[in-house]
Amino acid sequence: MINTFQIERQEPIPLESLIDFLQLGQNLLDKYDLPKVYHSPVSMKISRNSGGTTIEVENGLKVSLDLNDDFRRLFQEVNKVQNKKYPLYRVLRKFNISSDEKREIIDCTAGFLGDSLLLLILYPSLEVTAFEFNPLLFILLTDSLEKSSYKQLKKLKLRYGSSIDYLQQNEVAAKEIYYCDPMFEVKSLKSKNKKKIQFLEALIEDKNQQEFLPLLKGKNFIFKTSTLNHIDTKEYPIHFKEVGKNVTYYIFIAN
Ligand SMILES: C[S@@+](CC[C@H](N)C(=O)[O-])C[C@H]1O[C@@H](n2cnc3c(N)ncnc32)[C@H](O)[C@@H]1O
């Protein structure tokens, strides 16, 4: 069995071959209307591991995409401290969510699904749908989700495509909450997920944070940004703000 998959910078990669390598169903391409080929801005080597993949980028940066492992670690970490120590917990409290209420949250920017996992741990009755528009990352996340054994992870819905398109094209349900953690020019590198952020910085070329802002008006919306970036609160009046160590969460509540 071949254990590594090589991607060369800017070479057209038929996504079918990556799907084959990961032994995922071939219908993935049609099911999600994925592009047939992908041009990566960086070279990388992808190796399989039991819960997903390990990705080594050309400059030696190595990251693991293993959602089972991430979930287990986060779960243990959360159980050691009180939920309210997590800014994300305090952020969601602003929406008056009771512990057994089924509210739907749309994570507009999946990334490594770190925030989606944390939300599922802090609020187990939430229904989480996450959007990822990078096809390579989407396939790697799908692979890791398929290998997951946690019930909570099985209920997470992952969708391919731009959440901006979704927000523009779909009627918004009054109770839905939107969560957005877009790529910024400056991200604090003090984060404990530094390697994952560096990997996303190398892989994702589209920085579209400004496009989200006009879409959040009148919705239940959480906008996460690095402490170095600020939202013009005159143009986008916020209801609450939660300041974490490296990030600020701006909270908008639908009327
Ligand atoms: C900063 S990362 C999110 C990190 C994530 N919150 C986590 O904890 O792992 C931003 C991610 O959102 C994706 N993204 C950005 N804009 C998007 C859009 N309009 N639709 C879907 N995905 C988007 C990027 O490809 C990237 O993977």
Image (cartoon, grey):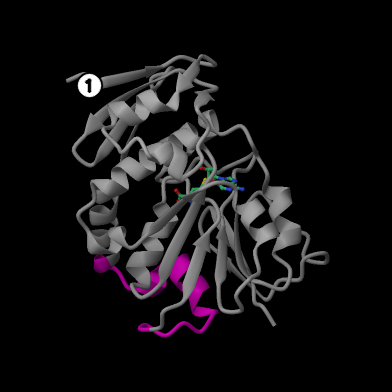
In terms of image quadrants, where is residue 85?
Answer: bottom left
- The answer to whether any part of residue 231 appears in the image is no
Q: Compared to 77, does 174 lie above or below?
A: below
Circle 1: is it few (<14), some (14-19), or many (20+) Cα within 10 Å?
A: few
Residue 44 visible in the displayed image: yes
The residue nearer to you, when weighing 108 against 73, is 108
Residue at point 67%, 48% (across, down) = 209
Q: Position of residue 31 (x, y in %)?
A: 44, 45
Q: Residue 16 magenta-drawn?
A: no
Residue, x 76% and y 59% (percent of image)?
Answer: 214
Return the residue at label 1.
3
Placement of the C terminus among the 4 image quadrants? bottom right
Tell which residue pokes out farthest to the right in this image: 234
Which residue occupies 31% across, 38% down? 25
Q: Is residue 20 left or right of residue 10?
A: left
Residue 136's spot in the image, x, y percent? 45, 33
Question: Mark 1 falls on what kind of element?
Answer: loop
The total of numbered circles placed on residues is: 1
- 70 in relation to 64, above or below: below
Q: Is residue 88 magenta?
A: yes
Q: Which residues are magenta?
A: 79-100
Left or right: 185 as drawn, with respect to 47 = right
Q: Callout 1, which amino acid?
A: Asn
**Rendering quarter of residue 72:** bottom left
Residue 227, given in percent of the width and then of the height, sits at 61, 53
Q: Residue 29 at x, y = what percent?
A: 44, 37
Q: State whether label 1 is within 8 Å of ligand 1.
A: no
Which residue occupies 38% across, 61% down? 118
Q: Is residue 75 above or below residue 66?
A: below
Q: Is residue 222 left or right of residue 99?
A: right
Seen from the viewer's position, the closer of residues 125 and 167 is 167
Q: Which corner quadrant holds the N terminus?
A: top left
